[in-house]
């Protein structure tokens, strides 16, 4: 069983702000028969609830890189997929893995139009009501969750921490291009969906972009579609 598991290609799933390793449960269920699924998780949530949240994007990148390197099987190909914050971190993680001569065969980025486009004012330090109004506007939390005060209380520190991590003044957009092919998807009603072709400026390889129905969390209604995209990209890469 272990041999079968270790010989499978790997998929690394990078969660969004406020998310954890279980955020992609339906996707994991779709893909785990064919791939070895890895779910790096940042401190302050899930299995790492007792650890203090990180406050800087570079700390988060270093943390996820450490987890990837720990579980990476060098003899099999792999793909990195990130949604929103996961896509922001994933871009620089791809670049770091390329420098290690262990590039992914693909980078799949959803819910983010690539570096240098979003011009959103900082929200991490807003009062609670305004903070959640902005998070909701960004599509960062469901209407169902908004109805329950105790759920908002639970998610508030985690969401503030993750938005603060991304809004940190030290987080300059790196002037880099990756060598890895990119497949980018955004929801039609996302504010920057029409900027999705921006991703082509950040890779020396191929870049394919799709816009699907839905808002920032279009992924929740499209896990079948995403699993098929990932399966197709990996199968095509492995057939070369």
Image (cartoon, rainbow, N blue to C red):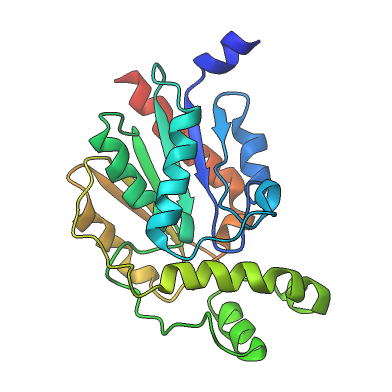
Q: In which quadrant is the N terminus drawn?
A: top right
Name the residue: 38% across, 73% down: 192
- The residue sitting at 47% across, 45% down in the picture is 64
Horizontal arrangement in the rendering, residue 27 relative to residue 155 (left or right): left
Please indicate whether residue 105 sits to the left or right of residue 69 in the image: left
In the image: residue 10, left or right of residue 53:
left
Q: Quadrant of residue 139?
A: bottom right
Q: Nearer the viewer, residue 231 or 11?
A: 11
Residue 148 visible here: no
Res. 58 image quadrant: bottom left
Please count the marks in the image: 0
The C terminus lies in which quarter of the figure? top left
Mark yes or no: residue 70 visible.
yes
Q: Which residue appears at 53% of the width and 79% of the height?
A: 124
Q: How far from the left and from the top, in percent, is residue 232?
A: 44, 33
235, above or below 181, in the image: above
The x, y position of residue 237, in whole percent, is: 34, 27
Residue closest to the eye, 225 or 160: 160
**Which x, y percent locates residue 212?**
48, 60
In front of the other: 83 or 42 = 42
* Residue 65 location (% of width, % of height): 42, 42
């Amino acid at each position: 069983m272990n041999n079968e598991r270790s010989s499978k290609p790997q998929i690394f799933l990078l969660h969004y702000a406020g998310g954890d390793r279980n955020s992609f449960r339906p996707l994991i269920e779709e893909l785990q028969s064919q791939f070895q699924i890895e779910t790096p998780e940042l401190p302050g949530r899930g299995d790492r609830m007792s650890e203090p949240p990180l406050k800087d994007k570079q700390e988060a990148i270093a943390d996820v890189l450490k987890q990837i390197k720990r579980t990476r099987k060098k003899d099999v190909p792999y793909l990195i997929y990130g949604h929103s914050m996961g896509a922001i971190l994933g871009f620089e993680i791809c670049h770091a893995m390329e420098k290690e001569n262990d590039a992914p065969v693909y980078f799949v980025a959803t819910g983010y139009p690539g570096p240098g486009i979003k011009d959103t004012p900082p929200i991490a330090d807003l009062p609670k009501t305004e903070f959640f109004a902005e998070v909701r506007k960004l599509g960062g939390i469901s209407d169902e969750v908004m109805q329950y005060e105790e759920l908002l209380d639970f998610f508030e520190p985690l969401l503030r921490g993750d938005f603060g991590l991304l809004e940190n003044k030290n987080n300059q957009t790196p002037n880099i291009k990756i060598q890895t092919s990119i497949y980018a998807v955004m929801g039609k009603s996302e504010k920057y969906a029409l900027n999705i072709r921006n991703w082509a400026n950040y890779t020396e390889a191929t870049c394919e972009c799709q816009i699907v129905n839905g808002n920032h969390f279009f992924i929740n209604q499209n896990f079948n579609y995403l699993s098929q995209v990932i399966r197709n990209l990996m199968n095509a890469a492995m057939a070369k």
